[in-house]
Amino acid sequence: MGSIPGRAIVNNCVYFIAEVKKISNKSLLTPQEQEIKKKASIVAALSSNHSWRTYKYLHNYCDIDRDAIVGETAIAFKDGWKNITESDVEEVVNSSQTPHMFAMWMFYALDEKQRSEFGQLFGKLKKEQEYGLEPIERKI
């Protein structure tokens, strides 16, 4: 029998989902927890599992449906973020949208303040999930 390695390895995505589940029923969130919620909202707003019409538009499968996109985004930001899965995160992080379509989606779905913050958090989320595995001590 081999021994357990000295450094435990955890998947970033699994860790992120665990953090989302941990805060999903809290009413008062710390600034760090607020950021987790916003990143989870991004995932819900862009994943095919939560926002099908948005996904179809961003991947050039249909024309923009402004009302549907606004509605899906509102649901994602209200409660949809609580139910994201690892596959949702992987899909969003690994998908590529054209910059124009992504900008148009942000224009219709988000207010001006949200657009800037969303763009920054989306980039941060992608960077954090860039590497599939990471030593657990970096998360503590």
Image (cartoon, rainbow, N blue to C red):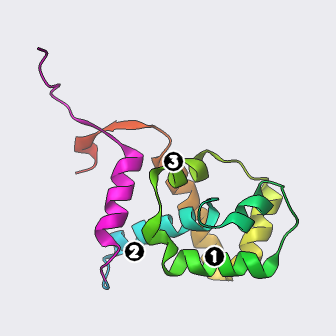
Say which amino acid is labelled 3.
Lys
- Three-letter amino acid code of the residue under disc 2: Gln
State which quadrant residue 120 falls in. bottom right
Q: Which residues are magenta?
A: 1-26
Does residue 15 appear in this view? yes
Task: Find out whether residue 20 is within the magenta segment.
Answer: yes
User: Alpha-carbon neighbours of circle 2 within 10 Å: few (<14), some, or many (≥20)?
Assistant: few
Residue topped by disc 2: 34
- Real-space Cα distance between discs 2 and 1? 17 Å
Disc 2 element = helix
First in residue order: circle 3 vs circle 1? 1
Choose the circle earlier in sequence order: 2 or 3: 2
Residue 75 in the figure: left or right of residue 129 = right
Q: Which mark is residue 73?
A: 1
Residue 68 to residue 138: above or below: below
Q: Residue at x 28, y 67 (%)?
A: 22
Q: Are marks 3 and 1 in contact (CB under 8 Å)?
A: no
